[in-house]
Each structure stands twice: as C-alpha cells, then as structure tokens.
Image (cartoon, helix red, strand yellow):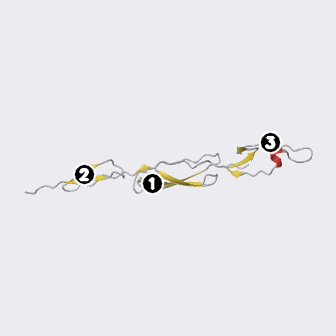
Amino acid sequence: MEPGYAIDVAGIGKINGTFTCHCTANGQFNGTCAADTEATPIDCGPLPTVEFAEVTGETHFGGTAIAVAIEGYTLNGLATGEKNFTFYCQANGRYSERQDFHCIICPVSPDHSHAEVELEDGHAEGGFLVQLEKRSLA
C-alpha cells in the first residue's frame, strides 16, 4: 500500500500497514479479502488551531491547509512580514510543522516639537499616545 493511504480491514483502519488474506481451496479469498477493499487517503483529523490566525483547508493526505494571521500579526512581528503560511496532512497521519504569528511591534516614534511621546504597550493594538503640551512663549 502506498504511504498516506489506509484500508479499513474488518472495521479497523490500517495506516501504511499490512494484513493477511487466505486463499481457500476453491480459489477464492475469504473474510475481509473477499470484499472489495479500496485504499483511501488518510485523514489527519480536525484542522489544528494556530494562535492569532484563521485556519482553512483539507484534512486528508495530499491536501494543504493555510493559516492566515488576524489583523495586527505577522510571522516576524513586522508590519511588512508574511501574513500566512501553508502546511499539510502527512502520510503518517499528522500535520506538518506550523509556524507562530507575532504581534506587530511599532517602531520608536519620531520626536515631535512641543510633545511628549509615551509608549503604551508597544503592540499594534496599543500604539503610541502623543500628549501635546501648551506652553506660553512669553
């Protein structure tokens, strides 16, 4: 059997495995082997969750899935970073390695005249808070 496929033998799924068939004296196979069996792509199960992303795609061997970052996240934490990656269901019934998304970090704010810049939390959700001070020029 080819890797990544399974045959359901007597109600027990066999992944990349073997089973024995016996030929009877009349030249026919008995039991499970007497029935038509078909190898089908294995199913890796429900799509895994990826933190800070929405995941869609196929769960069977040979299929691919994609994780797309929610707003404010990329693979490297930069606003210009990649916002998605693909992974797939492997022949062993497990999903391939997945990556982590990171919150976009804002760079240091430029200086502003007559203003005080205060970093709230450094993340895209927080950003910078600029407080202007009025001063008399007299």
Q: Are marks 2 and 1 in contact (CB under 8 Å)?
A: no
Taking the view exactly as shown, the residue that stands out farthest to the right is 26
Q: CA distance from mark 3 to mark 2?
A: 75 Å
Q: Amino acid at mark 3?
A: Thr
> Which sits in the foreground, 19 or 76?
19
Q: Position of residue 117 (x, y in %)?
A: 25, 51
> From the viewer's perspective, is the residue at label 2 or at label 1 nearer?
1
Residue drawn where x is 61% and y is 50% of the image: 89
Taking the view exactly as shown, the residue that stands out farthest to the front is 11
Residue drawn where x is 61% and y is 55% of the image: 63
> Which sits in the foreground, 20 or 129?
129
Q: Tell whether 18 sits left or right of 94.
A: right
Residue wearing tag 2: 117
> Tag 2 or tag 3, which sits nearer the N-term?
3
Q: Are marks 1 and 3 in contact (CB under 8 Å)?
A: no
Q: Position of residue 37 (x, y in %)?
A: 77, 50
Q: Are marks 3 and 2 in contact (CB under 8 Å)?
A: no
Q: CA distance from mark 2 to mark 1?
A: 28 Å
> Tag 1 or tag 2, which sits nearer the N-term?
1
Q: Tell whether 51 sits left or right of 15.
A: left
Q: Secondary structure at mark 3?
A: loop
Residue drawn where x is 83% and y is 48% of the image: 34
Q: In the rendering, which numbered label is found on residue 23? A: none
Q: Secondary structure at mark 1?
A: loop
Q: Amino acid at mark 2?
A: Val
Q: Amino acid at mark 1?
A: Ile
Residue wearing tag 3: 20
Q: Residues within 10 Å of mark 1 (few under 14, many from 20)?
A: some
Q: In the rendering, which numbered label is found on residue 70? A: 1
Q: Secondary structure at mark 2?
A: strand
> From the viewer's perspective, is the residue at label 1 or at label 3 nearer?
1
